Image: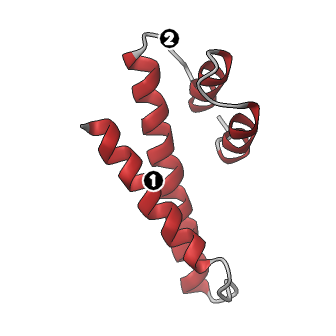
């Protein structure tokens, strides 16, 4: 159930961030709102990755980025998805 909740949270925050793309982000409130939506989307994406690695017993990642390295190595995500995640997750 946690996996479904994390996926739904990701989709919600990602959709909310997409709605703000064409807005004037020089407005501090809009900028802050978009930043928080992106942060929450990435956080939910990390939870999804953690769940998959744990359920499939793929290892014990020591960083958030390593979660996505494992998923790429195992063929669960593509190189394109990995590269996108890598840009969002510094550690």
**Residue at (66% x, 77% y) in the render:** 21
Residue 53 location (% of width, % of height): 47, 20
Left or right relative to 42: residue 8: left
Number of the label disc, if any, that sits on residue 1: none
| Circles 2 and 1 in contact, beta carbons < 8 Å | no
Residue 67 location (% of width, % of height): 56, 25
Residue 83 location (% of width, % of height): 75, 38
**Residue at (52% x, 61% y) in the render:** 14
Q: Quadrant of residue 24?
A: bottom right
Packing grade of label 1 (10 A; few <14, some 14-19, many >=20) is: many
Q: Which residue is mark 2?
A: 58
Q: Is residue 17 above or below residue 89?
A: below
Q: Is residue 81 above or below residue 55?
A: below
**Residue at (44% x, 36% y) in the render:** 48
Q: Which residue is mark 1?
A: 10
Left or right relative to 8: residue 26: right
Left or right relative to 20: residue 86: right
């Amino acid at each position: 159930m946690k996996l479904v909740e994390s996926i739904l949270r990701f989709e919600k925050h990602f959709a909310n961030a997409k709605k703000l793309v064409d807005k004037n982000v020089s407005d501090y409130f809009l900028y802050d709102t978009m930043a928080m939506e992106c942060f929450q989307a990435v956080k939910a994406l990390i939870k999804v990755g953690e769940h998959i690695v744990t359920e499939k017993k793929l290892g014990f990642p020591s960083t958030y980025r390593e979660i996505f390295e494992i998923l790429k190595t195992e063929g669960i995500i593509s190189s394109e998805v990995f590269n996108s995640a890598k840009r969002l997750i510094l550690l």
